[in-house]
Image (cartoon, rainbow, N blue to C red):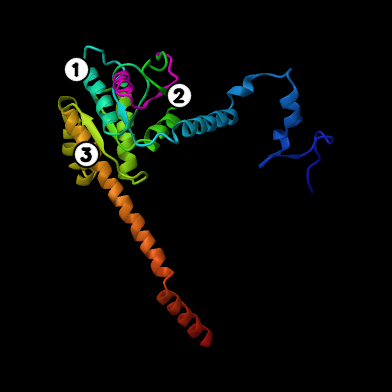
Amino acid sequence: MAEPSIHPDRPQSQQRGPVVMRRNQVQHSTSEQRLLDSRGPSDWVHTDPWRVLRIQSEFIEGFGMLAELGAAISVFGSARTRPDDPMYAAAERFGRKLVEAGYAVITGGGPGVMEAANKGASEAGGVSVGLGIELPFESGLNEWVDIGMNFRYFFTRKTMFVKYAQGFVVMPGGFGTLDELFEALTLAQTRKVTSFPVVLFGTSYWSGLADWLRETMLADGKISAADLEMFVITDDVDEAISYIVKSGELADAAAQEAAEAAARDVAEVDSPEARERREAHRLGSDGQ
């Protein structure tokens, strides 16, 4: 026998959409009542369900903004790189050369390397994209961003970097740059994305990391030798561009070959001979 309710006038269970609430978790006002009552607290805008809508809106806005972008390369590097740093000039040249090769340029939209790459792309007449992030010490998108969006969440922003890029150029940077680098390598290694070219620019900066990956991670069996082939290190902008373009051509050829193979398979399945075999098999099965 069920125990009597302390409050017999209150329901013992309540359905809120797909959620079931029972006993002390039952709420004694409706969703519509709380929505229309302006006298209540406003802290609901900071709750997790509301954050889900904000996250959803960031995906929708980002996808809508970049859906027709075309071929693009994401360029990463330190926001602390000053205009008199040789890496600033190299990033600017990357932006210009990538546009000349037919790519849009995507950066994090901030200062330093990001600003330089956006500047090179914009001045070359290409599409210069900046995907900013809401941080207490960032001042917004740099002036060379032609298409830009500020994100609240790193993970939605990172999705845009990967989804709409055909390759990465990674210049000297800090934790954020390493985060983006290893995100790309992890996705490629686990085949969550189609493998794409990753260029580490600056041999003196990246060689120590490559040595550690080879002499420690590989030697200890934590990665395979093939994983070290997912990126190249160079000091030559033109060499990097050639590598990116060549990788793109190989990827396009592989995709075309896969599409043609799929078309052949469909044609073979629908051929008169195949239909006759299926009919003969059906008749034989019916006879049994």
157 vs 214, nearest the viewer:
157
Q: Is residue 32 left or right of residue 61?
A: right
Mark 1 Cα shell of 10 Å, populated few (<14), some (14-19), many (≥20): few
Task: Tell me the distance, in whole angstroms, between the alpha carbons under discs 1 and 2.
Answer: 28 Å
Mark 3 Cα shell of 10 Å, populated few (<14), some (14-19), many (≥20): some
Say the numbered circle drawn on residue 217: 3
Residues in magenta?
Answer: 115-137
**Number of the front mark, 3 or 2:** 2
Q: Amino acid at mark 1?
A: Pro
Q: Amino acid at mark 2?
A: Met
Say the numbered circle drawn on residue 122: none
Q: Position of residue 45 (x, y in %)?
A: 61, 23
Asked whether the beta carbons under mark 1 and mark 3 sit within 8 Å of each other, the answer is no
Q: Amino acid at mark 3?
A: Met
Residue bearing mark 2: 149
Residue under the image location 49 percent in, 33 percent down: 64
Q: Position of residue 197 (x, y in %)?
A: 26, 39
Say the numbered circle drawn on residue 86: 1
Q: Is residue 284 left or right of residue 7?
A: left
Asked whether the beta carbons under mark 3 and mark 2 sit within 8 Å of each other, the answer is no
Residue under the image location 45 percent in, 20 percent down: 134
